[in-house]
Image (cartoon, rainbow, N blue to C red):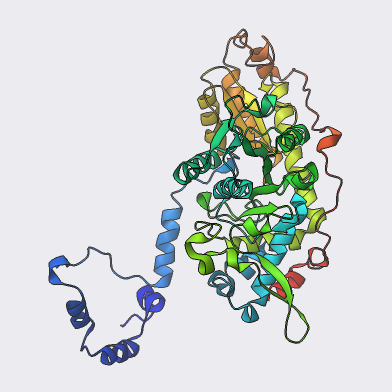
Amino acid sequence: MPVTDLVAARHIGPRPAEREHLLATVGYPSLDALVDAAVPPTIRDAEPLDLPPARTEPEMLADLRAIAGKNRVMTQMIGQGYFPAVTPAVIRRGILENPAWYTAYTPYQPEISQGRLEALLNFQTLVSDLTALPVAQASLLDEATAVAEAVALMHRAAKREGVVLIDADLFPQSLDVTLARASAAGLGVKVTDFEEGLGSDDDGVPVLGVVVQQPGASGRVRDLAPLIAEAKERGALVTVATDLLALTMLTPPGELGADLAVGSAQRLGVPLFYGGPHAAFIAVREGLERTLPGRLVGVSIDAHGEQAYRLALQTREQHIRREKATSNICTAQALLAVVASAYAVYHGPEGLKQIAERTHARAVDVARGLQAHGVQVEHEHFFDTVRAHVPPARAAEIVAAAAARGINVWPDGPAHVQVSTSEVTTPAHVAQVIAAFVEVLSELPANCCGGGCCDGPRAAADARDGSAEPTIDGVWPEALNRTSEYLTHPVFHAHRSETSHMRYLR
């Protein structure tokens, strides 16, 4: 019996009649004859490929599910810019599984791309509002390349020789990519610990710019106002690498005087995707918009006098300026920027704030639970990441104990473990993480922490009974708390139900 639903025929095509028509058009009797004419025999392998029999679609799906079933599904609490997120079903179905969205290319023809342009304008509005900077573009490849683009932008804007100081508390991938790009482009950069400010410029090299992470890779949240003020006094531009969800609670970079903000929009409804792709963002103050890399959606008026959307300031871009563009490696992530904007439309400002507060509360639970068992928590103020100082060489054991419970946490050297919470973190996850610490630390002698790695010499005993008194309360200094409104446009308040959101996307 002939099989008509093999994947190759369905997915690849063309059908036999179409194939005969194509071959007749180019003048060959068969596909083999065409290949013989096109591919020299000296480079062809005469042996047939060792492939299994062709599968039907149900058979292929069953095979793939069997392979995927061999994976052990873990709960990710590593942080470092990667956070599990909930993709609402209406967004998954309406965008990620909809070819009208996932097959579209750059909207060079605005007259047929108004829906996509509006979604990207929503993304720009989301970024601009949360960062408190007036101009945001329509996404970049990832946060690491966004930081590198910010460094290049600050060098372009300065128009003089000098160095950009980069926060040592940047995510490791951001440091690696930025240093590599700067080296290749001949841009001066210097990794700096900003604990004591910008430091001196005794070497005579002027500081052109500063890149600082808030919250830091270590989880630390700090008042950036003094650092930004010092940078301004020295004539430097300031970039803040930040977290959009955290900015629903933290004072935004623009209000602190920063010139640029960069980061990732991944945690706004975008799956982890095994580490990417994820949409990044970059926003700038007025006066820097012509130095921005990538696409920028603007609002115009059409021939009928109606509001319309189009790509703006395109003379900066590769398809016009070629090698003189502001950037030639600024690939957008438009589809995932659309997902993030739809997530913000679906939840609205109140929903985003609630998710942020719940994420922060779970991190506070982790910190207090660790302190109750005698573990030293390094930073008093944090958003979603708790950094624990543990006895030397014990970090790997704690990571392994957490993994045995189905949770991945982040080891930062032999004596530090970091735990990051997200919107999917539950009290059960918190309890399992604390249990992993207790399992390892309770086996240590009572004087194991004499070197200051825990909260006192009784840490091992406290790890057994949880009798230590937590000091962290999760309350930030007033200067860190956001007071300004965001996402005030009606679109972020009008489509909260699945039906309304579905109609809006269509």
Which image quadrant: the C terminus? Answer: bottom right
Q: Pinpoint residue 154: horizontal percent, then vertical percent.
A: 62, 46
- Is residue 321 shown above or below 261? below
Quarter of the figure with residue 235: top right
Which image quadrant: the N terminus? Answer: bottom left
- Is residue 488 shown above or below 76? below
User: Which residue shows up at 50% across the image and 56% down it?
Assistant: 329
Q: Is residue 26 left or right of residue 457?
A: left
Q: Pinpoint residue 160: horizontal percent, then vertical percent.
A: 59, 43
Quarter of the figure with residue 444: top right
**Residue 90 shows up from this direction:** no
Q: Is residue 486 left or right of residue 7?
A: right
User: Which residue shows up at 51% across the image and 30% down it?
Assistant: 400
User: Which residue shows up at 55% across the image and 27% down it?
Assistant: 398
Q: Pinpoint residue 173: horizontal percent, then vertical percent.
A: 52, 41
- Is residue 219 shown above or below 488? above
Quarter of the figure with residue 175: top right
Q: Pinpoint residue 464: horizontal percent, then vertical percent.
A: 66, 18
- Is residue 282 shown above or below 366? below
